Image: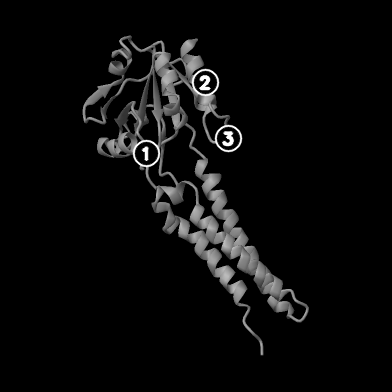
Amino acid sequence: MRSFPKNLDKFIDAGIRVVGISVDTPEKTRDYMLQKAGYTFTFLSDPKLEAIGRYDLVHAKELASGKDIARHRSLAHGDREFFCDSAAGTGSRSRKGAAVKAVLTCVAS
Amino acid sequence: MKRLNWQIWAGFVLSLVAGFSYPFVFVRWPITREFPWANLILFAIATVFLFLGLHRAFKPDKRIVSKIFSSLAAAFGLLLLAGLLFIIFVAGRWLPASAAAPQVGQKAPDFTLTDSNDKPVTLAQLLTEPINNKPPKAVLLIFYRGYW
């Protein structure tokens, strides 16, 4: 998650709108993501798992929280219609910046 | 007089506390949940006690029973540590297969969600509203776990 906000400028330069989606309510998102973390891009709330469900990203009863959450995943909608998935470049074991690069390449191609 | 090997007991009880305090106590706060700092510190202290207890039990004048008992206690403590690390770092990251997920190249499903100003926003809107006075080339959706 963190590598994307850090590279926000690169995305904006490439004409990519960055949007964060989670189960948190708008109120929680304001508190944590905008005020505390200081992120400046768009955040959407999906407490009922509408979009998270449609993209099949529900991680049912995650071990640590015991609640349904979204899997970590970033999807870029290139050409306004189709999407490429940077999941191959994300995760704790992957190289730093791999996911960011994957998205930029995907949109540029 | 036979004296109690308190180190091995302390180590044993501490490793129990270190193992079971994660699901019951430390899982509540993100800082101790994301990385089990508190539990690892407790385990470190428990290991020191277990080691001291083992050291004492394996002195030549000690009986075989105390050697066996302290070895079992130490093994149990280490097993708990291994179990906790496995659950957090291995099993916790297993994800169910995502069969219905849209495939690469497929059209992104539209949705309407509430933004941080409590206004409804659709994906179609995000794809057309300009950034830097130009229509965006793409929208990057970052799904993150939430529950901060």
User: CA–CA distance between discs 3 and 1?
Assistant: 21 Å
Relative to the observer, which residue lies in front, B99 or B109?
B109
Relative to the observer, which residue lies in front, A5 or A45?
A5
Secondary element at tag 2: helix
How crowded is the residue under tag 3: few (<14 C-alpha within 10 Å), some, or many (20+)?
A: few
Q: Are marks 3 and 2 on the same chain?
A: yes
Q: Are marks 3 and 1 on the same chain?
A: no
Name the disc covering residue B146, or none.
1
Outermost right residue: B60
Q: Position of residue A53 (x, y in %)?
A: 36, 31
Residue A106 vs B61, above or below: the answer is above
Q: Position of residue B130 (x, y in %)?
A: 30, 12
Mark 2: amino acid: Lys
Residue ID for mark 2: A101
Asked if the residue at tag 1 contacts the one at tag 3, i.e. Cβ–Cβ closer than 8 Å, the answer is no
Determine which quarter of the picture holds residue B122.
top left
The residue drawn where x is 50% and y is 64% is B17
In the image, which is nearer the foreground, mark 3 or mark 2? 2
The answer to whether residue B101 is seen in the rendering is no
How crowded is the residue under tag 2: few (<14 C-alpha within 10 Å), some, or many (20+)?
A: some
Determine which quarter of the picture holds residue A15.
top left
User: CA–CA distance between discs 3 and 2?
Assistant: 16 Å
Secondary element at tag 3: loop
Q: Position of residue B84 (x, y in %)?
A: 54, 54
The residue drawn where x is 26% and y is 35% is A26
Mark 3: amino acid: Arg
How crowded is the residue under tag 1: few (<14 C-alpha within 10 Å), some, or many (20+)?
A: many
Q: Chain of mark 1?
A: B
Residue ID for mark 3: A93
Which numbered disc, 3 or 2, marks the residue that appears first in the sequence?
A: 3
The residue drawn where x is 42% and y is 58% is B24
Asked if the residue at tag 2 contacts the one at tag 1, i.e. Cβ–Cβ closer than 8 Å, the answer is no
